[in-house]
Amino acid sequence: EATLLDHVSSYREKLPPIRVYQAICKGKKNEQIIRMLTEAGVEETIFITSTFCQEKTFNDHDKQRLYDIQREAVQQSGSKTKVNPIRTIDISEVVKDSPYKVLFLHQSSRGDTISLSKALSLIEEKQVSIIIGSEGGISDEECEALEGLGATPVLLSTNILRAETAGIFAVGAIETIWS
């Protein structure tokens, strides 16, 4: 069994620690999100509730399903990600919860918005947390509160991305910029 994953990937460098705080999305999108982020080597995916979340919690069955998908993604991809219990917190708790600098993706430019590459260049230790909104993004009130707590708004140099695409796109960009 130990040799099954030896040939999965030739990339052996340690990936930068990245935590993703993903707003709960509708339906099965959360399953797709946790699978992709786990395969990409994200340290932990924490689900958050925010203004535009249509679903605010997971039942025990949903949590177990997400945990199982995460476990399978680690096994199939050779990811070094630790399989973590599924956690849900409010968006207002992210900055306190995160051990790293917090960036949040926003769909439009805000007063202090900077590019992802600029934000990453300002972080001395290569470790970061990113917040991804649900369908509808992050409300202006939540953005103001996050900025007040020290989080940095980031605008990706691309089209507005779907909630289930934004996280994997940002993680790929971070890993590329920092590698």
Image: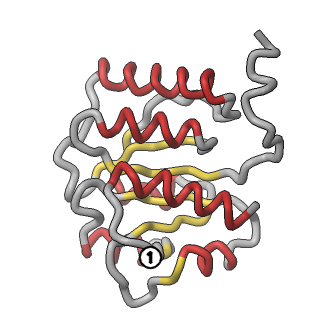
* Residue under the image location 76 percent in, 60 percent down: 179
Quarter of the image where one finds residue 107 = bottom left
- How dense is the environment of label 1, judged by Cα within 10 Å: few (below 14), some, or many (20 and up)? many
Q: What residue would you read off at disc 1?
A: 155
Specify whether 48 is left or right of 84. Answer: left
Question: Looking at the picture, how far across and down is residue 70, in whole percent?
Answer: 50, 28
* Residue under the image location 75 percent in, 72 percent down: 124
In the picture shown, does residue 63 fall above or below 139? above
Question: Looking at the picture, how far across and down is residue 18, in whole percent?
Answer: 61, 52
Specify the farthest residue to the left: 54
Q: Is residue 153 visible?
A: no
Question: Looking at the picture, how far across and down is residue 169, in whole percent?
Answer: 49, 57
Q: Is residue 114 visible?
A: yes
In the picture shown, does residue 154 fall above or below 25? below
What amino acid is labelled 1 in the image?
Leu
Specify the farthest residue to the top: 1
* Residue under the image location 29 percent in, 54 percent down: 134
Q: Quadrant of the N terminus?
A: top right
* Residue under the image location 58 percent in, 56 percent down: 172
Specify whether 105 is left or right of 150. Answer: left
In the picture shown, does residue 75 fall above or below 29? above
Comparing 57 with 54, the one in front is 54
Q: How many marks?
A: 1
Residue at disc 1, secondary structure:
strand
